Image (tube, grey):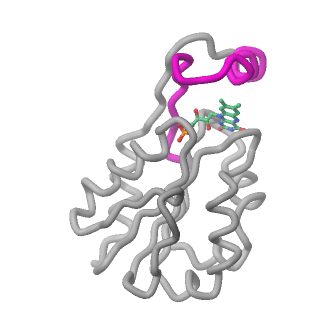
């Protein structure tokens, strides 16, 4: 099965997760949405993933989804989010993806996140301290969930 993992990241966590998914799906191609829009026709399975900021996925991925929704509905589809919150998963998905896509997805999950103050701006560090109580590096990237996510997309 030809698989594309298309991610949108700010500081690299969603890229890291995309690559961990690819380790479980060795034939998968991993692409950053910032490197240009891929041709979906080449793929049977498409995995879309983005980090969250203030509850929103990154804009280039949002635009890509609205432009290619019909084509995406024909694919074996997986959706992932990278965030630090352990609650509100359903709302994050429903706020960011069209209902048809959510219904069509074989699997959709939050797979954890990374906060690295060394790569964040001062404003981001202040927000993370005030809103999430994060003061230092934290990673909640969930390897078990990633393996289960990839497994759900494998042809059985
Ligand atoms: C300004 C800011 C806002 C954030 N908002 C959310 C949020 O609404 N929900 C959440 O779960 N995580 C939130 N996070 C955490 C990021 O989603 C998390 O660190 C993610 O792994 C970053 O991925 P990236 O490095 O691919 O951009 C926020 C982080 C920052 C810096």
Q: In which quarter of the image is the N terminus?
A: bottom left
Specify whether residue 127 is painted magenta. Answer: yes
Give coordinates of residue 37: x percent, y percent. Answer: 52, 70
What predominant SS class does the magenta segment belong to? helix
Give the residue at x 36% y 60%. Answer: 30
Specify whether residue 121 is painted magenta. Answer: yes
Residue at the far top: name it: 135
Say left or right for 24 vs 36. Answer: left
Say left or right for 71 vs 6. Answer: right
Give the residue at x 43% y 46%. Answer: 15
Q: Nearer the viewer, residue 52 or 110?
A: 52
Asked if 127 appears above or below 93 in the picture, the reply is above
Give coordinates of residue 62: x percent, y percent. Answer: 68, 63
Q: Quadrant of the C terminus?
A: bottom left
Q: Nearer the viewer, residue 113 or 40?
A: 40
Question: Magenta segment range?
Answer: 110-132
- The image quadrant of residue 121 is top right
Residue at the far front: name it: 36
């Amino acid at each position: 099965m030809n698989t594309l993992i298309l991610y949108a990241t700010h500081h690299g966590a969603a890229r890291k997760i995309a690559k961990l998914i690819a380790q479980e799906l060795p034939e998968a191609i991993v692409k950053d949405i910032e490197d240009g829009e891929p041709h979906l026709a080449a793929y049977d399975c498409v995995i879309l993933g983005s980090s969250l900021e203030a509850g929103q996925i990154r804009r280039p991925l949002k635009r890509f989804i609205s432009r290619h929704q019909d084509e995406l509905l024909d694919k074996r589809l997986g959706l992932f989010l990278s965030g630090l919150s352990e609650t509100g998963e359903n709302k994050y998905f429903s706020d960011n993806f069209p209902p048809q896509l959510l219904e069509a997805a074989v699997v959709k999950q939050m797979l954890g996140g990374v906060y690295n103050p060394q790569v964040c701006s001062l404003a981001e560090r202040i927000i993370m301290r005030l809103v999430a109580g994060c003061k230092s590096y934290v990673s909640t990237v969930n390897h078990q969930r990633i393996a289960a996510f990839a497994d759900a997309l494998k042809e059985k």
